[in-house]
Image (cartoon, rainbow, N blue to C red):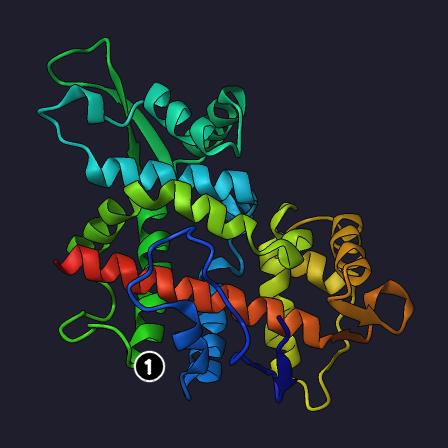
Amino acid sequence: MGASFLNGIIEVDQISFDDGAVAFRVPPHEFLRAPAFAAARDRLIAGKLAVYEGNHLFNRLILEEGRFLCYLAALSLHAAQDMERPSTWLTLGRLQREVTELGVASRNRVEAQVSCLRKYGFLTQQPHASDRRVRLLIPGTALTERDTAILGHLVEGLRTLGLSPTEGCESPLSGELHRAMRRATLPHLSGLSRLIRRHLPLAPFFEHDCGYMILLLLLRGARHSADGTLPTGYQRLATQTGVSRTHVRRVVEAARNAGLLTTAARGGHDIRLTPAMWQAADRWFADNFALTDLLLREALA
């Protein structure tokens, strides 16, 4: 089914999001139809970039589909664990089982990511107080603070859209509400994995290191440009994301080949996003808002 494109927002009367990936309380198309959607989307992009920009190491560790779901699973398992029930404890083995069941990473890849997160202080590992043979994984402050900030920006977007029970939600997001929302995330991890995969048009960004960061930078730049053209080149994007110029070129070329953007000059200058890019991005952010709405309602229940 088709959709029309007008002023950077897709008209959604003929778009269906219903594929059963997640049982939303408010369907994504309702968020997309909201008069304040464009404003909420742009503020969310700015908020995410405020968290990600300058954090090159952190971005490399999580901004790729498999690594992102591993990071999200770790936070969710930690928030949901019951110390009276050993089967719920966040251990390397439990995390490996959860992530491999999602089909996004092997056990070895999960172990490698955990090792990197521990190396840089985003995760710690310590023996359980009553059974020192069991080593528990514990998210570090840097990890939880960044995740709390991202969820906070999403909840602020819901407040702008006016379709969710945001009354009484503190800004910034409280630690208690953050933990409750991540507990609510755990049973939806498999649905979230399917949700990401249904956004195939954005695969050139999701499947590459820091590709999501590049996507956000392109969207922000296009909205700030008077004529929609981004003069930025591969080198500037590489500097902003902390990856190589060659890596950025591969991501941009993959997006261009998928019909998401055009380039009019060598070196990735004069990038222009196509209507297909805006359509794909708006559907992605509508899903983001619908998922956050679901998690918020379940956390508050």
Q: Residues within 10 Å of mark 1 (few under 14, many from 20)?
A: some
Which residue is pictured at 62% across the width and 63% down the height? 215
Q: Nearer the viewer, residue 259 or 58?
A: 259
Q: Is residue 65 left or right of residue 130?
A: right
Most extreme residue toward the top, as rendered?
Answer: 133
Looking at the picture, which amino acid does disc 1 mark? Thr
Q: Is residue 160 left or right of residue 203?
A: left
Position of the N terminus by quadrant? bottom right
Which residue is pictured at 18% across the width and 18% down the height? 128
Q: Is residue 248 left or right of residue 175?
A: right
User: Residue 141: in sight, yes or no?
Assistant: no
Rendering coords of residue 293 (x, y %): 29, 65
- Residue at which label 1 appears: 160
Which quarter of the picture shows residue 221?
bottom right
Which residue is pictured at 36% across the width and 67% down the height? 154
Q: Nearer the viewer, residue 145 or 64?
A: 64
Residue 196 higher or lower than 98, as above or below: below
Q: Nearer the viewer, residue 81 or 201?
A: 201
Which quarter of the picture shows residue 158?
bottom left
Rendering coords of residue 102 (x, y %): 46, 34
Residue 107 higher or lower than 272, as above or below: above
SS at badge 1: helix
Rendering coords of residue 3 (x, y %): 62, 77
Residue 109 higher or lower than 157, as above or below: above
Rendering coords of residue 286 (x, y %): 45, 69
User: Residue 32: in sight, yes or no?
Assistant: yes
Position of the C terminus by quadrant? bottom left
